[in-house]
Image: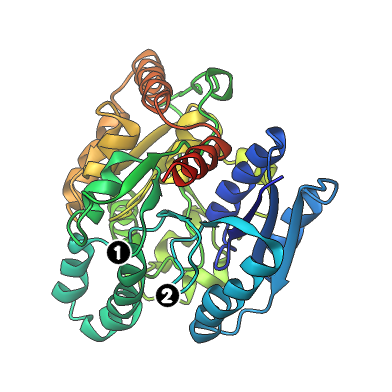
Amino acid sequence: MKIILINALGIQDSGGITVLEKMLLECVVKVKYKYYIFVYEHSNIDNLILEFTHYKSLVFIKIQNRGIVHRLYVENLYFSTFVKEKSISLIYNFSGSNQFITKIPSLVKVQNLMFYSKKLDEVYKSSNLLKLWVKQIWLKRVMFLSMLKRSTYIEIQSEHVKNSLEEFINVKDKIFYLKNDFSADKQNFKIPKNYDLGKKLTFLYIVGPHFSFPHKNIQDFVKAMSTLKESGKDFNIKITLSFEEINSSPLWKSSLNENTIFTGYLKNKYEIQALFQDNTVLVSTSIIETLGLHVIEGIQNGILCIAPNEFYSKSVYGEELLKYKLFDVEMLNYIISNIYTMTEKEIQAKNQSIQTYMIKNEANKFYNVVNIFDKILEKENNV
C-alpha cells in the first residue's frame, strides 16, 4: 500500500476544517492508500481527529504552531527526512504551500486567493494601508509564489482560481485538477425556504475572527443595515461574532445592536444549520473567494443570498444569484429593497434555479481526491 503525506498545517478555522473533513472522508470511503496527516494543535483539529479516530489508514501528527520559520523547517527539512523514513509516494499540500528540497511529486491545493488578487491590492493601496498590505499580503505572496512556481500539479476549486493565478505565474506548464469541495449531490440541497414579506426579514452575516481584514469588506454590510434601519424597516441581523468582538471594532455601528443577534463562533454543523431559517437573507460582501462556503451553505439550505457581482460569484453561484457592485452601498440597498417587492413564489423559483445551476456546475469536477492521487502517481510512474 502506497503512503501519502497530507500537509494540513495552517488549517484551523471553520471553513478550512469543513473542506478538510470532506477530503478525509473521501480518503476513508475509498481505502487505497495510507495517510500521515500533519496538523497544528488546535481545539477544532482535536474534534476532527476524534471523528476519525477509528480509521487505521489515517495517522494524525500534531505539532505546535511556532510561526512561519518553524513551518518552513517542518515542511522542508523535517518532511524530507520523514519522506525517506516512511517511503512516502506523494505529498498533498492541502493549505497551498510546497517543498523546496523533497524530490517526490506533490499536489498543491490553492484555496486562498488573498495572495493572488490584484483587486485586493488596489483596495489596500487606495485605503492607505500599504504597510498592512506588505505584512498581510506581499511578504506571503513572495513565499507562496516561489512555492507555486515549483509546483507541477495544482488542485483548484473553481475555474476562476486559475484565472487569478494566471496574473502571477505561467500556468501553461502546470497541470490543474478541478475538485469539488462540498456536497453537490441533489439530495444535499433542501427545498427553498418560505418567505412572508409581511413579517420581519433576518439578514444573516457569516464571518470569522478576521472580520476586520479588508478582504472581508464588512463596511458594505454595516452601511446597508444602517440605511435600512434609518428607513424605518423592522428587521433582524444575525452575525456569527460575539457582542464584545464586533463592538470593539470601529467598523461596527452600535445603533445596530438592538436589531442584532450575536451568535458568536459556531462550534458544529448543527449550530450552523440552525441559521438557515424562513425569512432569512444571507449577505456576503467578500472581495475575493475561492468558493465562499457560507454562501454555498445558504444556497444548499434554500435561503435567498446576496453576493458581490465579481467573477468568482458568477463562476460558483451562477448568474441568477442576487449581486451588487462592490462598495456600491446604494446598489446593495436597492437590491435589499427589491426583495420586499418579490412574491414568495418568485423567491422560491430563484433559489431553485440557483441550486440547479450549482448541481450542474459541480458535476464535471473530481468528487474524490483519491482519484486525483491515482492520476498523479500513474503519470509519475509512466515518466
Residue closest to the eye, 326 or 116 = 116
Residue 262 visible, this angle = no
In this rendering, position of residue 333 left or right of residue 55: left
In this rendering, position of residue 68 left or right of residue 267: left
Snapshot quadrant of residue 70 = bottom right
Give the amino acid at mark 2. Answer: Ser
Residue 131: numbered disc: none
Is disc 2 surrounded by few (<14), some (14 to 19) or many (20+) residues within 10 Å?
Answer: few
Q: Secondary structure at mark 1?
A: helix
Task: Locate residue 360, reporting x and y percent.
Answer: 39, 20
Give the amino acid at mark 1. Answer: Lys
Residue 107 visible, this angle = yes
Task: Locate residue 152, reporting x and y percent.
Answer: 36, 54
Q: Secondary structure at mark 2?
A: loop
* Residue that badge 1 annotates: 149
Which one is closest to the eye, mark 2 or mark 1?
1
Snapshot quadrant of residue 336 = top left
Residue closest to the eye, 232 or 159 = 159
Q: Residue at x 31, y 80 (%)?
A: 139
In this rendering, position of residue 353 left or right of residue 45: left
Choose the circle earlier in sequence order: 2 or 1: 1
Q: Residue at x 37, y 76 (%)?
A: 250
Task: Locate residue 345, reporting x and y percent.
Answer: 38, 13
Q: Are marks 2 and 1 in contact (CB under 8 Å)?
A: no
Q: Residue at x 45, y 31 (%)?
A: 299
Residue closest to the eye, 330 or 51 = 51
Is disc 1 surrounded by few (<14), some (14 to 19) or many (20+) residues within 10 Å?
Answer: some
For marks 2 and 1, give the CA distance. Answer: 38 Å
Q: Quadrant of the N terminus?
A: top right
* Residue that badge 2 annotates: 249
- Rendered view: 102 above or below 259: below
